[in-house]
Image (cartoon, rainbow, N blue to C red):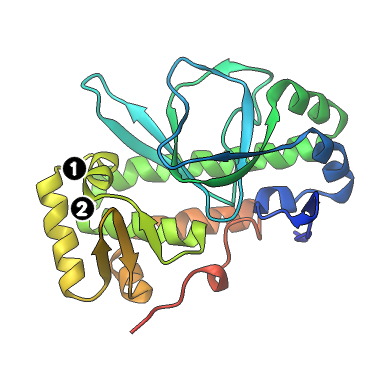
Amino acid sequence: MNRLVLRSGTEPVSNNLLRALRLEDWAMLEPMLEEWSAPTGLVMHAPGDTVRFAYFPCGSSLVSYLVVLGDGRAIETAMVGREGAVGGIVSQGRLPAFARAEVQLGGSFLRIDLQRLEEVKTRSPTLRYLFARYADCLMAQVFQSVACNAAHSIEQRTAKWLVAAIERTGADDVALTQEQLAAMLGVGRSYLSRIIQDLRQRGVIETRRGRICVRDVDELRSLACECNKSVTAHFDDVLKGVYPAEENAPAASG
């Protein structure tokens, strides 16, 4: 799949899914997109809310899909960065949300009203098929997350989450507290703290106030389960070039 250097206004578009569009499809979609920014922690939509927009994270922006349980816990089921989109890109019009979409790392987005997106999809089968293939990739990530939560250790899942975050953002640190990460992984904070302390002592990560910094990404990858690789492989089979390339991830530091 050819990667296009599309521009929104005067700036290159730093969302890989949009860059995978054909030029003819981008020409139809671009006038309907609006720039939008969001801070870390913003809830884009909660369960039951009407989803009105599709959002395309740009650059280092990161969004988590969280399933809210009856006791109030919110467990992450998928993470979306510059490789994808959040919202009903394949649904026909506005629908109620099932999961909570929360900005994990604030930044810039492009967004489009779903009714206007539907208009473009009716005019362009190639755009419609591209978004349908992305929806398949997102579903694969959810399937893999279910299997990962059932089969892999907390250390593996912690390493997997951090690797996925830095691959999507292109940064070597994540604005995240241990309490937040524990909640998303669905584990106790004290258990996760022991994992974080061990990773810190081994020089794999460094923690600062409200941040986790990766110092040895190769070692972190070796500790993670195979789930990230499985999701990346599926992206490459279905939408080659959309998932952030290895060279865009931060290099290991000594």
Q: Is residue 120 left or right of residue 77?
A: right
Instruction: Please provide percent x and percent y for residue 62.
Output: 49, 47
Kindly identify the residue that appears in the image at 28 percent across and 53 percent down.
210
In the displayed structure, would residue 149 be above or below residue 16?
above
Residue 172 figure quarter = bottom left
Q: Is mark 2 on a helix, strand or loop?
A: helix
Instruction: Please provide percent x and percent y for residue 44.
Output: 50, 29
Residue 201 figure quarter = bottom left
**Residue on which disc 1 sits:** 187
* Mark 1 vs 2, N-terminal side: 2
Q: Which amino acid does label 2 sit on?
A: Ile
Q: Is residue 50 left or right of residue 34?
A: left
Q: Residue 154 carries which label?
A: 2
In the displayed structure, would residue 14 be above or below residue 47?
below
Q: Is residue 111 left or right of residue 179?
A: right
Instruction: Please provide percent x and percent y for residue 21.
Output: 78, 48
Q: Which amino acid does label 1 sit on?
A: Val
Kindly identify the residue that appears in the image at 79 percent across and 53 percent down.
7
Q: Considering the image in quadrants, where does the N terminus appear?
A: bottom right
- Mark 1 surroundings: few (<14), some (14-19) or many (≥20) residues within 10 A: some
Residue 242 figure quarter = bottom right
Q: Is mark 1 on a helix, strand or loop?
A: loop
Kindly identify the residue that appears in the image at 50 percent across and 57 percent down.
168
User: Quick one: 31 or 163, which is closer to the camera?
Assistant: 31
